[in-house]
Amino acid sequence: MATWRRDGRVTALQRLGCAGLAGALSLSLTAPLELLTVLAQVGTWHCRRGLRGAGHSLCRAEGVRALWKGNLTACLRLFPYSALQLAASRRLVILFTDELGHISHWRAIMAGSLAGMVATIVTYPTDVIKTRLIVQNRLEPSYEGILHAFYKIYHQEGLLALYRGVSPAILGAVPFSAGSFFVYINLDKIWREPIVHFTPLQNFINGCVAAGVAQTLSFPFETVKRKMQAQSPWLPHYGAVDVHFTGMADCFRQTVKNKGVLGLWSGLTPSLLKLTPGVDQSLQPQELRELKLLRRENFERRKSALEN
């Protein structure tokens, strides 16, 4: 498992900036795959001839630049999302660590999942805007940009529309965590050697496998989330969603009824192709002990100051 290590050469702000720039570059390079994933999940007309045909149809209808629709929103969302996730993850890791500075894989994964939930909820409106920008026609847009989309959705559909689909987004964290946990508890059996002896290449493969399994298990919730984000009576063709529904449960039901069970996994292939293993923000036992000692020293210092 990859590990965060403190580096005295850069500040926390510089480290966050570097991570943000790297993430933005990664998002920009894989934006066409993300777009194809969203279009397949929503079920727009582009995907009737498969994913490759969807790309060709979109380029012919809206131009090559259409492959990067919504990418600016995704890049701008990355910075607050990463900052919130990192801050929440550090707090939760320390909270879940015992007095000896040890933390289990399950607790570390739970800390990361809860931190992801916090960041997801706070930045969720930007995810809705990204989906709306992707499904609209670039040449005949309903929204002229990010701020116009936010303003128009808020005034036409209300504040709750900016959080449409947040329930499956949160529920999807459960199978995602379970999938990650299943992979990590079996790593020593897969490689037939202790985890502490893993090479960087093995850790990279572990991250890819864990992320792939976790994403596959949680993908139906992601699909329903995208359909709920896109569906709107204010958009042409009702947001181009392939099924019509009244809520999360009905969206699951209508998708299975009209598209079959596998319809919940539409778009999984490009999603896995753009998959990169996430950087684990957990700390090794020694680093966790240092944080525990530092927190204890600060507490004792404040206590003695109050007594004096």
Image (cartoon, rainbow, N blue to C red):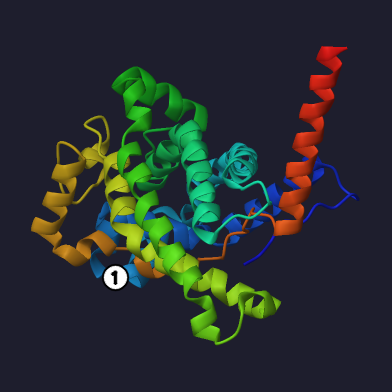
- Quadrant where the C terminus is found in the figure: top right
Task: Tell me: residue 246, above or below residue 63.
Answer: above
Residue lying at the far front of the rendered structure: 307
- Count of numbered tags: 1
Task: Tell me: residue 123, above or below residue 108.
Answer: above
Q: Give the percent coordinates (x, y) of residue 121.
A: 45, 34
Q: Give the percent coordinates (x, y) of residue 56.
A: 38, 67
Which is more toward the observer, 296 or 63?
A: 296
Residue drawn where x is 8% and y is 57% of the image: 257
Residue 38 appears in which quarter of the rendering? bottom left
Which is more toward the observer, 291 or 278?
A: 291
244 left or right of 18?
left
Which is more toward the observer, 170 or 144?
A: 170
233 left or right of 292?
left
Residue drawn where x is 47% and y is 57% of the image: 67
Q: Residues within 10 Å of mark 1 (few under 14, many from 20)?
A: few
SS state under label 1: helix
Residue 213 appears in which quarter of the rendering? bottom left
Residue for badge 1: 50
Query: Is residue 136 visible to the viewer in this orientation of the structure?
Result: no
Q: Give the percent coordinates (x, y) of residue 295.
A: 75, 36
Residue lying at the far right of the rendered structure: 9
Which is more toward the observer, 205 or 160?
A: 205
Residue lying at the far left of the rendered structure: 257
32 left or right of 160?
right
Residue drawn where x is 50% and y is 34% of the image: 123
Q: Give the percent coordinates (x, y) of residue 169.
A: 36, 44
Residue type at mark 1 is: Gly
Query: Is residue 265 visible to the viewer in this orientation of the structure?
Result: yes
- Quadrant where the N terminus is found in the figure: bottom right
Task: Tell me: residue 187, above or below residue 289.
Answer: below
